[in-house]
Amino acid sequence: MAIDPQVQRHIMGHFATGVTVVTAMCDGQFAGMTANAVTSLSLHPPLILVAVEKTATMHAALTASRHFAVNILDTAQEALSRRFAQRGPKEVGDLTWKTADSGAPILVDALAWVDCRLAEVLSGGDHDIFIGEILAGDCREGSPLLYYCGKYKRLEA
Ligand SMILES: Cc1cc2nc3c(=O)[nH]c(=O)nc-3n(C[C@H](O)[C@H](O)[C@H](O)COP(=O)(O)O)c2cc1C
């Protein structure tokens, strides 16, 4: 018998992660979703993956846009993470972003970002795995926002 989903969530919540907001422009509209199911996949070629729930608004946005950015958040961006983890439409009017070469929006205050072209989509149960070819990226010094056991954390000095 398979493990109970809540037990799986509790156990896997012990896997501490960073926090990202995945962004895309879809029909001229900014789309964003908080995501921590993100992994640097390959260097040759340069690939990253993000697992997106099939019912998420972002799933349709990524499928349509074919380009996306992964913005790695710092501790000052916890509110942004909470905003883009909410169900339903998100307020984006106050955000400052720049447009990457691919057309994907980059959050200017992100700790790091990569701009991606959608390379492949694999099925993963109730999620799909979006594999992006990394076209460009940048990073700065800072303190990463972390997520552990359902709570936001930060590195101790
Ligand atoms: C820390 C954190 C990480 C998350 N990571 C993911 C993820 O990797 N993939 C995903 O599909 N949803 C993830 N979510 C949930 C989505 O952010 C959330 O379901 C989505 O923003 C809902 O928006 P929608 O109603 O517009 O689809 C995460 C939520 C939080 C708080």
Image: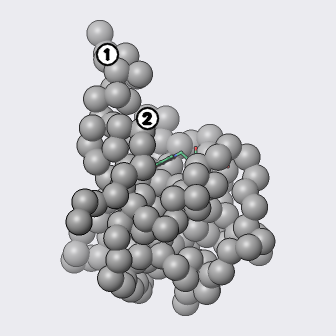
Mark 2 closeness class: few <14, some 14–19, many ≥20 residues within 10 Å:
few
List the residue tagged with mark 1: 2
**Residue closer to the observer: 95 or 153:** 153
Residue 123 drawn above or below residue 109? above
The residue at the point 56 percent across, 42 percent down is 54
103 relative position to 37: left or right: right
SS of the residue at dot 2? loop
**Residue closer to the observer: 131 or 78:** 78
Q: Earlier in the sequence, mark 1 or mark 2?
A: 1
Indicate yes or no: mark 1 CB to ligand 1 under 8 Å: no
SS of the residue at dot 1? loop
Residue 35 drawn above or below residue 118? above
Say what amino acid the circle numbered 2 marks: Gly
Mark 1 closeness class: few <14, some 14–19, many ≥20 residues within 10 Å:
few
Q: Position of residue 130 (x, y in %)?
A: 45, 57
Badges 1 and 2: C-beta atoms under 8 Å apart? no
Marks 1 and 2 sit apart, C-alpha to C-alpha, by: 13 Å
